[in-house]
Image: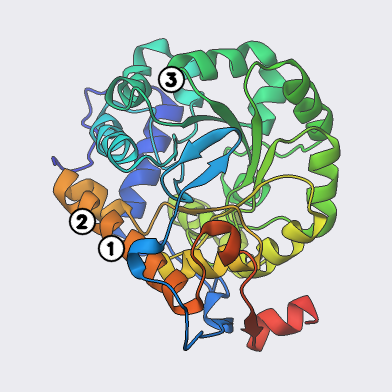
């Protein structure tokens, strides 16, 4: 794949340029930070699993759709011409493996329809996959349901992710710094849109209390987007040109709820499906997240290097993740995803302290 460098001739606008900045930083620098908590989760080994690996069934149902595995290609990119190829590769993987995919924020294409190709290529490549659109809660509040409907129709989405990213907005020099009216915005979208609404955080996690509020506002699913994966504080600090926002990035680098803790808390609300994203590195982390109560396990930054290399590298990596998940299921005696959600586990360290378990 060609380098992720937008040339001076790319008159795509500030939002589009920022999307390329984000992808380039994720691809070329270390933007991960913190511990998602999965090293503090140990699944109980079953020495007599009483099944064969061939008996393991990873199929699951999410928002009414049967999927081949509870793995979610979490929203990564889009909105700049140079991001289209990455989205095409990810979409091909979603179609090939029968797993869902989310796109990155569609704001740039909503502002400039000439950029829609970086998103429409996803549905063109994955005609039968479960696809989720993506718009920020702030943009939805400020522009209304028309933007949500356009985001859905742009990729013929099966669901719409409404993302919450207020830590990023505080550190981003040009950030949106008002969260007033967000719950009502989510409530209206959940009531009026033709597809389910998934509310997702982007690296700071969702607490038990926030999850209850989001469910009461009508969220069909919650993506915890916990601490321990991609650090938007780190990314926006790198983009900032002034001392104040650079220092904010440093000060709040450790802000957030570790993903494992967030999954544990949100699952206790028990109101709607839970997606675990934020620092999952392999199929074992996915199994741990599902044991903690998640319904789906999402990955983004972990898969990005392989997605940039192309189809073969990404397909191979996802095959490995699926094998790791099946191995964890076999070694715990869980023949299906429902059984995996009931296996016993031990909590240690920070996760045990934060969950009081």
Tell me which label, 2 or 3, sits earlier in the chain: 3
Where is 26 relative to 82, above or below?
below
* Mark linked to residue 316: 2
193 displayed left or right of 301: right
Structural distance between the alpha carbons of marks 1 and 3: 28 Å
> Which colour assignment does the render follow?
rainbow
Residue drawn at x 36%, y 42% as measured from the top left = 21
Picture coordinates of residue 184 (x, y %)? 84, 28
Tell me which label, 1 or 3, sits earlier in the chain: 3
Structural distance between the alpha carbons of marks 1 and 2: 6 Å
* Total residue callouts: 3
- Residue 227 visible to the viewer: no
Instruction: Please tell me whether mark 1 or mark 3 is closer to you in this view.
Output: 1
Instruction: Please tell me whether mark 2 or mark 3 is closer to you in this view.
Output: 2
Residue drawn at x 32%, y 43% as measured from the top left = 97
What kind of element bears circle 2? helix
153 displayed left or right of 273: left
274 or 278: nearer the viewer: 274
Where is 353 relative to 194, above or below?
below
Q: Residue furthest front?
A: 50
State if disc 2 and disc 1 touch (CB < 8 Å): yes
State if disc 3 and disc 2 touch (CB < 8 Å): no
Picture coordinates of residue 112 (x, y %)? 43, 14
Q: Quadrant of the C terminus?
A: bottom right
Residue at the spot of label 3: 155
Q: Residues within 10 Å of mark 2 (few under 14, many from 20)?
A: few
Residue drawn at x 35%, y 52% as measured from the top left = 25
Picture coordinates of residue 238 (x, y %)? 43, 56
208 or 248: nearer the viewer: 208
* Mark linked to residue 320: 1
């Amino acid at each position: 794949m060609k380098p992720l460098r937008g040339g001076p001739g790319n008159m795509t606008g500030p939002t589009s340029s920022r999307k390329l900045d984000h992808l380039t930083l994720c691809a070329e620098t270390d933007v991960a930070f913190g511990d998602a908590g999965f090293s503090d989760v140990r699944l109980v080994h079953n020495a007599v699993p009483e099944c064969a690996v061939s008996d393991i069934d990873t199929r699951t149902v999410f928002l009414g759709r049967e999927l081949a595995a509870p793995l979610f290609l979490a929203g990564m990119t889009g909105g700049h011409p140079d991001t289209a190829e990455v989205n095409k590769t990810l979409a091909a993987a979603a179609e090939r493996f029968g797993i869902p995919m989310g796109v990155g924020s569609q704001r740039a294409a909503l502002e400039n329809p000439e950029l829609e190709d970086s998103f429409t290529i996803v549905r063109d490549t994955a005609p039968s996959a479960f696809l989720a659109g993506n718009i920020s809660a702030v943009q939805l509040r400020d522009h209304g349901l028309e933007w949500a409907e356009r985001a859905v129709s742009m990729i013929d989405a099966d669901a719409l992710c409404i993302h919450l990213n207020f830590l990023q907005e505080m550190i981003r020099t040009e950030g949106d710094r008002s969260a007033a009216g967000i719950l009502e915005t989510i409530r209206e979208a959940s009531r009026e849109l033709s597809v389910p609404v998934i509310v997702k955080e982007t690296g700071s996690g969702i607490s038990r209390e926030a999850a209850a509020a989001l469910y009461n506002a009508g969220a069909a699913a919650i993506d915890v987007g916990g601490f321990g994966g991609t650090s938007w504080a780190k990314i926006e600090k790198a983009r900032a040109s002034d001392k104040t926002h650079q220092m904010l990035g440093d000060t709040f680098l450790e802000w957030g709820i570790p993903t494992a803790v967030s999954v544990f808390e949100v699952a206790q609300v028990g109101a709607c499906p839970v997606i675990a994203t934020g620092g999952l590195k392999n199929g074992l982390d996915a199994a741990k997240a599902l044991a903690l109560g998640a319904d789906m396990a999402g990955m983004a930054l972990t898969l990005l290097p392989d997605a940039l290399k192309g189809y073969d590298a990404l397909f191979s990596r996802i095959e490995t993740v699926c094998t790791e998940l099946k191995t964890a299921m076999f070694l715990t005696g869980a023949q299906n995803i429902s059984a995996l959600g009931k296996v016993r586990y031990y909590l240690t360290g920070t996760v045990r302290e934060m969950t009081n378990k």
